Amino acid sequence: MTSWSIPCTDAAAPRPRAKARALLAGLLVLACCLLPVARAGADPLSSANAAYARGNYPLVVQLLAPLAFRGNAQAQALLGFMFENGYGAPQVYITASDLYYQAAIRGNPFGQGMLGLMYDKGHGVPQDFVLAYKWLNLAAARAPKHERDYFLRLRNAVASKMSPVQIAEGQRLAMLWATAGQ
């Protein structure tokens, strides 16, 4: 008599199909346990960008606010954008311009450029083309190459509304700011 022809009657021996199901269930439980941990440890700025891409603006504001209040210039600039446009927060130009200012003084080019546009439009701050030129000039100087042309075009559009004396004053203010180590 050969052992291969005798059916297994041991109740403790797992069947191949049951073993595969148990393995699959174990992997599924493991994946479910690890997934929330990985997401909880994600960078808040990355999570905010992902939420923005999905259109979940209230979550973006919720993720950016603590970072902005702790002085993160990128979070301040992005949160300013949310308040300027009313995405996930009320549209409040004064709050937006304050957040842009906080980011701008920390050297964030996006914050500097957006603050310059706020001065150009007079949103949340008094309309002032000289200060608009200053901040847009600083943004162009600090921006990565692929963004520099954009800020230069904006600065030049503001300059088209200014006298040569005003342009010189805007350049002087930008130079003072840049050389003061701000």
Image (spheres, rainbow, N blue to C red):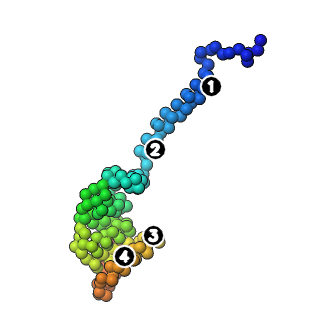
Question: Which residue carries the number 4 mark?
Answer: 154
Distance between the alpha carbons at the discs numbered 1 and 2: 33 Å
Question: Which residue carries the number 2 mark?
Answer: 38
* Nearest to viewer (mark 2 / mark 4): 4
Going from N to C along the chain, the mark reached first, 2 or 4, is: 2
Mark 4 neighbour density, 10 Å: few (under 14) some (14–19) many (20 or more): some
**Circle 3 SS class:** loop
At x 52%, y 31%, the residue is: 25
* Nearest to viewer (mark 1 / mark 2): 1
Q: Quadrant of the C terminus?
A: bottom left
Q: Which mark is residue 16?
A: 1
Distance between the alpha carbons at the discs numbered 2 and 3: 31 Å
Going from N to C along the chain, the mark reached first, 1 or 2, is: 1
> Can you name the residue that lies furthest to the bottom here?
164
* Residue 102 visible in image: no
Going from N to C along the chain, the mark reached first, 4 or 1, is: 1
* Nearest to viewer (mark 4 / mark 1): 1
**Circle 4 SS class:** helix
